[in-house]
Amino acid sequence: MGNLTTQLGRLATVAFGGLFLAISGSFAEDAGNLYNTNFDINAGLRYFERQCSRCHGFDAKGNDETGAPDLTGRLTRASSEVGIFNIIRTGIPGTAMLPVAADLPDSQVWQLVAYIGSLSTNPANIDLPGSVVSGSRLFTNKGDCNSCHMIDGQGGRLGPDLSRVGERRSPEELLSDLLNPHDDVAPRWWTMRVTENDGTVREGLRMNEDSFSLRIMDNDANLWSYPKNQIASFERVEASTMPSYTQTLSDSEVDDLVAYLFSLRKEN
Ligand code: HEC
Ligand code: HEC
């Protein structure tokens, strides 16, 4: 996993965790990129093709002849969105990297920043150590993830649908989902532990609850309904029902699952 962690470290520097340095003067401020929708990314791409690709290449992977570096991985001169903004706005003195036209509005510079940011989260540009094919086998075989998770209509409903999880989770977050499932569990996935009057304890996802009754779904997808005044007690459990895989899967198996999950997108 050292391998993945190093790569993720590299990613994180360009993936903009949201920590921006405030820089004084005419430089960009600490507000993050407000021009970061798909529309902006596409506008940035079009501008890039016209003004930047002749040196950096149409795929932004750099060009040895012009000496313009690859912009799809970790940048050497910037580690934040603001840093990239400033390079584009002011250029890199003493090199072929010139500033953009002074009358180019900041909004368009931010669109370029958004485009460059999108390159580092594009799965085609991310070289993860795991194997997508092995990960997909693990998901249904040894990992038994499909007993709780649905992908493209196949699987269980005891956890979130993962059909497009690669669009909403970074490789780093997916790794943490597998190793530390109890961090940040959304209320939708909290469970209830009900103690019946005869002492029987049942636990399950909280499906419905109002003042008088509650309904839970246990791990075998059985529904249990209870009038609240006919049970001994109930409590909410804010931990995940998903086990941690630190012990049961090897580092390389976890890498494979991360690669597979990250590949799950609409286009597939
Ligand atoms: C005439 C060639 C040329 C053009 C056009 C050009 N660049 Fe560059 N760019 C370079 C070179 C050369 C460097 C490396 C300078 C250095 O670090 O020595 C560079 C560096 C960069 C870097 C810093 C990369 C890093 O790893 O830190 C960014 C970001 C960048 N360019 C973005 C752009 C954008 C966006 C455009 C279009 C608006 C653009 N460049 C247009 C030649 C060019
Ligand atoms: C017993 C049921 C269960 C099993 C088995 C299970 N999960 Fe989960 N999983 C959940 C639940 C519930 C959540 C939501 C709560 C949370 O964040 O942990 C979840 C969350 C996730 C998430 C985060 C999804 C998101 O949208 O944020 C990922 C990724 C994930 N699981 C992958 C896996 C993989 C891969 C396996 C197999 C190695 C697996 N799960 C096995 C129940 C399960």
Image: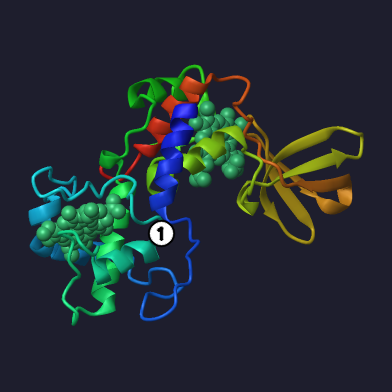
Left or right: where 34 falls relative to 59: right
Estimate the x, y position of residue 18 in percent, counting from the top left.
Answer: 48, 61
Whether residue 52 is situated above or below residue 222 in the rendered picture: below
Whether residue 104 is situated above or below residue 67 in the rendered picture: below
Estimate the x, y position of residue 24 in percent, counting from the top left.
Answer: 44, 78
Res. 61 visible in picture: yes
Q: Residue 191 appears in which quarter of the rendering?
A: top right
Q: Residue 105 appears in which quarter of the rendering?
A: bottom left
Left or right: where 118 falls relative to 2: left
Estimate the x, y position of residue 174 in percent, counting from the top left.
Answer: 49, 39
What colouring method underlies this structural image? Answer: rainbow
Residue depicted at 32% across the width and 62% down the height: 84
Estimate the x, y position of residue 245 in percent, counting from the top left.
Answer: 59, 26
195 or 61, which is in the foreground?
A: 61
Residue depicted at 70% across the width and 42% down the height: 239
Q: Secondary structure at mark 1?
A: loop
Whether residue 81 is situated above or below residue 222 in the rendered picture: below
The quarter of the rendering in which ligand 2 is drawn is top right
126 or 137, which is in the foreground?
A: 126
Residue depicted at 79% across the width and 41% down the height: 193
Decide if ligand 1 comes within 8 Å of the CB at mark 1: no
**Mark 1 lies on residue:** 80
Count residues near mark 1 (Cα–Cα under 10 Å), then give few for <14, some for 14-19, many for 20+. many
Count the labels in the image: 1
Q: Check disc 1 and give the amino acid type.
A: Ser
193 or 132, which is in the foreground?
A: 132
**Image quadrant occupied by the C terminus:** top left
54 or 248, which is in the foreground?
A: 54
Res. 157 visible in picture: no
Left or right: where 199 falls relative to 155: right
